[in-house]
Image (cartoon, rainbow, N blue to C red):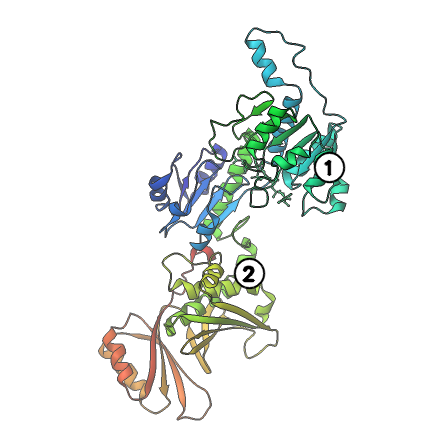
């Protein structure tokens, strides 16, 4: 039964789903870091977290068990996604579940800043009645600038418009028309809006482009008395610039929910007049936490029960319906990759996957990734799947190309994979017979064999007696032959041929040596494939 580790406090509604699923065990282990986290992660198949735990490359290093991480929330910056991708671990998030709560928190901070709610209450409980000191400003009629008009930015905009603010915004991916429909005036760059805004809020991810997006230079361009809010990620505003701006009176107020490093209990901004800070509470409402915990638990349950990958931030989504419709073809491509990895032991330089017939109607890029996963799996220590296979090929400079032809050939669907190494080009074709992957061509030879279990592939001269000798040899070594297929290029005997044997057990090295010493046999390889009904986890196995 798959085991899931719960790394941050999570709403009980999400955990209850694991209970009712009945086929997943979970264990709560919060507050982990360093070696404790690494060790804990190695004992589980799935992990679920919020933003507290830091899943670093070091904490995933050498992990051969973990398959999926679900983030109950939007930002996945606390997870090293490159490291996860390299190890074939799917990272999924739950965008949307906390949008409204975070937008409301942004508005709450703007209102609190404008009316000095927090210092006014503080002075009151300290025994003062300072009505003059806390003269505020209205939001109505003011201009709000929003950088980042995704889910939360747009939700803030609609709420600000309801408060009768003017909203101007910048987002490189929001069309002018959509902005117009929302009542937002767009700018060509953040720079253009800065002199206009009374309030500024940011709702972008933190990345190289957005780090220090608002620095001293940008603060200088703003109106005197501007108020700034950040409920996105710490680091988008440069903290030194904020301190300086507050000291000079250029900035009237700063409200932060997020910090460059969290947890944060010490900041040069803490305690400064005009500053209001909350400890990353944007999504901390009962509603948002129920939403994200339930959604994250569902993602893991679906992943472990049907193989469905949804809302992944490190791979293209594969919903259960798509997976169902593609599983057979994915399986053929995967097994062809595994087979070709074992017939030539030299490092591949390039690969080509050709699709013929009906299979062209499917998402062949996923099928090619599945082929790459099979090819790389053999050589890798970690699980290789359609998430990381492409990266692993690219990291090794192996080119993967695809060809498609809708012409129906001999089969309604045919997948042909070719791997080029320094010494040779190996090629095999497979198709589905019902739901069973079959090998139908090895190189130029037409064969007919199951693509599972232990196979012996051998090239030989098509002369009488060869097959008998091979059978006798395996009999001597007590290896049972379950199936045999022989194929030759032309109908004429005497040329080159290929034999494929399905064996019930792994033949000893001695048997292979004796086989290769037979006059008519030029090459032989043992290929180990998964059993007929065995699928990798990412294919729903
Ligand atoms: P989203 O993906 O829906 O929106 C982000 C938007 O930023 C996108 O539209 C994107 O085009 C835009 N963007 C990216 N780079 C930009 C740039 N250089 N300039 C301008 N716009 C840019 O994400 P969301 O759900 O709206 O979340 C926004 C942020 O809020 C994320 O960083 C998320 O982690 C954070 N967040 C914080 C809390 C909290 O508790 N404080 C809760 C939820 C989300
Ligand atoms: C998020 O990215 O979803 C938020 O930062 C909320 C959280 O981490 O809880």
* Image quarter hosting the C terminus: bottom left
Vertical position of residue 38 compared to residue 493: above or below: above
Q: Quick check: which quadrant has ligand 1?
A: top right
Circle 1 SS class: strand
Q: Residue at x 41, y 67 (%)?
A: 338
Task: Give the quarter of the image for residue 218.
Answer: top right
Q: Is residue 201 left or right of residue 49?
A: right
Q: Is residue 387 left or right of residue 225?
A: left
Residue 168: numbered disc: 1
Quick one: label 1, few (<14), some, or many (20+) residues within 10 Å?
many
Q: Is residue 501 left or right of residue 52?
A: left
Task: Calculate the distance from the C-alpha at mark 1 to the C-alpha at mark 2.
Answer: 45 Å
Q: Residue at x 69, y 40 (%)?
A: 191
Return the x and y of residue 319 as percentages of the image width and height: 55, 53
Q: Residue at x 48, y 41 (%)?
A: 78
Q: Nearer the viewer, mark 1 or mark 2?
A: 1
Q: Which residue is mark 2?
A: 325
- Looking at the picture, tell me which residue is in the foreground, 412 or 222: 222
- Looking at the picture, tell me which residue is in the foreground, 273 or 532: 273
Vertical position of residue 169 compared to residue 90: above or below: above
- Looking at the picture, tell me which residue is in the foreground, 94 or 53: 53
């Amino acid at each position: 039964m798959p085991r899931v580790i719960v790394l941050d406090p999570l709403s009980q509604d999400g955990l209850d789903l694991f209970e009712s699923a009945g086929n997943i065990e979970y264990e709560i282990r919060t507050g982990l870091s360093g070696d404790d986290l690494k060790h804990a992660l190695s004992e589980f198949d799935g992990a679920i977290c919020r933003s507290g735990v830091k899943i670093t490359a070091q904490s995933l290093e050498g992990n051969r068990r973990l398959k999926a991480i679900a983030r109950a929330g939007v930002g996945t910056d606390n997870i090293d996604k490159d490291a996860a991708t390299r190890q074939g671990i799917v990272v999924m998030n739950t965008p949307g579940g906390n949008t409204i709560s975070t937008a409301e928190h942004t508005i709450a901070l703007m209102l609190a800043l404008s009316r000095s709610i927090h210092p006014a209450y503080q002075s009151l409980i300290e025994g003062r009645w300072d009505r003059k000191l806390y003269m505020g400003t209205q939001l109505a009629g003011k201009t709000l600038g929003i950088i980042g008009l995704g889910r939360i930015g747009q939700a803030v905009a609609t709420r600000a418009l309801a408060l009768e603010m003017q909203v101007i915004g910048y987002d490189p991916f929001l069309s002018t028309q959509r902005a117009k429909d929302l009542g937002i005036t767009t700018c060509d760059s953040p720079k253009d809006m800065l002199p206009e805004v009374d309030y500024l809020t940011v709702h972008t991810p933190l990345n190289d482009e957005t780090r220090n997006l608002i620095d001293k230079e940008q603060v200088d361009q703003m109106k005197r008395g501007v108020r700034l809010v950040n409920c996105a990620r710490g680091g988008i505003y440069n903290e030194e610039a904020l301190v300086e701006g507050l000291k000079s009176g250029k900035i009237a107020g700063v409200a932060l929910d997020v910090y460059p490093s969290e947890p944060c209990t010490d900041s040069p901004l803490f305690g400064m007049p005009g500053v209001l800070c909350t400890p990353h509470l944007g999504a901390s409402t009962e509603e948002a936490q129920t939403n994200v915990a339930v959604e994250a638990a569902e993602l893991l349950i679906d992943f472990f029960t049907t193989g469905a990958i949804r809302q992944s931030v490190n791979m293209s989504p594969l919903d259960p319906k798509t997976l169902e419709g593609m599983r057979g073809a994915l399986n053929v491509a995967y097994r062809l990759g595994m087979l070709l990895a074992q017939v030539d032991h030299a490092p591949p330089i390039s690969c080509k996957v050709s699709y013929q017939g009906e299979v062209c109607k499917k998402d062949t890029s996923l099928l090619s990734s599945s082929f790459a996963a099979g090819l790389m799996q053999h050589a890798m220590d970690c699980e290789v799947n359609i998430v990381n296979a492409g990266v692993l090929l690219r990291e090794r400079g192996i080119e993967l190309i695809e060809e498609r032809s809708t012409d129906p050939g001999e089969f309604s669907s045919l997948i042909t994979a070719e791997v080029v190494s320094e010494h040779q080009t190996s090629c095999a074709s497979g198709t589905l017979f019902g739901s069973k992957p079959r090998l139908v061509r090895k190189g130029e030879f037409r064969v007919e064999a199951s693509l599972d279990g232990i196979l012996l592939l051998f090239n030989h001269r098509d002369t009488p007696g060869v097959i008998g000798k091979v059978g006798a040899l395996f009999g001597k070594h007590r290896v049972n032959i379950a199936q045999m297929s022989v194929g030759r290029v032309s109908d004429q005997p005497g040329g080159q041929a290929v034999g494929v044997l399905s064996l019930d057990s792994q033949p000893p090295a001695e048997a292979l040596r004796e086989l290769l010493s037979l006059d008519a046999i030029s090459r032989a390889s043992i290929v180990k494939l998964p059993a007929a009904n065995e699928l990798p986890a990412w294919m729903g196995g």
